[in-house]
Image (cartoon, helix red, strand yellow):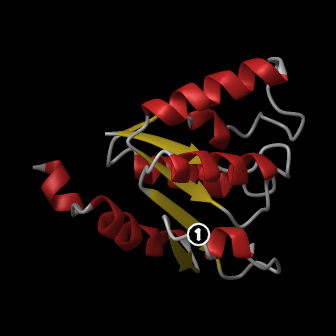
Amino acid sequence: MKIYFAGSIRGGREDWENYASIINQLRQFGEVLTEHVGDGTLSDDGEAHTDRDIHDRDLQWLNEADCIVAEVTTPSLGVGYEIACASGWRKPILCLYRLDSHRRLSAMIAGCPQAKVKSYRDLPQLNAILEEFFGKSLSEIEE
């Protein structure tokens, strides 16, 4: 299973530690193509690549992925773009929204019929959400 994880980069990096934890949990279900999103050394300036290179590489990864998991608490134009592409390509989409945020979730994400939006309070709650989304329990994966 190839998983595309989406989280804010240029929209703000305040959630990078949360992204790293989610990516770590996602590894139990498959290969995460976008582990760099959880890298604490990555600033909101982004990567040392051209915008076009990032765009083309990320769309290639998204097309290759079996599904997308997006942390949508921090608003990001890029994450929204990725969700829209995945929706058009009929990929399974899981959007994670942290309830303790002072931000409201975009209606374009919350109302997207192809996206499963799940709210959570803390990282331990994510295991059940991920198990439901991937249709497997952790015990089945470990066997």
Residue located farthest toward the left when viewing the structure as drawn: 143
Can residue 13 be seen in the rendering of this structure? Answer: yes
Position of 11 with respect to 114 (left or right) is: right
The x, y position of residue 85, in whole percent, is 60, 45
Residue at image mark 1: 112
Q: Residues within 10 Å of mark 1 (few under 14, many from 20)?
A: some
Position of 6 with respect to 22 (left or right) is: right
Task: Note whether 110 is above or below 75 in the view shown.
Answer: below
Query: What's under tag 1, amino acid-wise?
Result: Cys
The x, y position of residue 22, in whole percent, is 52, 55
Q: How many labels does the image show?
A: 1
Q: Which residue appears at 45% of the width and 69% of the height?
A: 126
Task: Note whether 112 is above or below 68 in the view shown.
Answer: below
On the image, which quarter does residue 96 sit in?
A: bottom right
Q: Which residue appears at 56% of the width and 36% of the height?
A: 35
126, 5: nearer the viewer: 5
The x, y position of residue 133, in whole percent, is 35, 64
Task: Note whether 94 is above or below 89 in the view shown.
Answer: below
Q: Which residue appears at 21% of the width and 64% of the height?
A: 137
Position of 32 with respect to 143 (left or right) is: right
The quarter of the picture where the N terminus appears is top left
Task: Note whether 8 is above or below 55 in the view shown.
Answer: below
Position of 120 with respect to 65 (left or right) is: right
Instruction: Look at the numbered disc 1 and give the secondary structure of its residue.
Output: loop
Q: Which residue appears at 84% of the width and 37% of the height?
A: 43
88, 41: nearer the viewer: 88
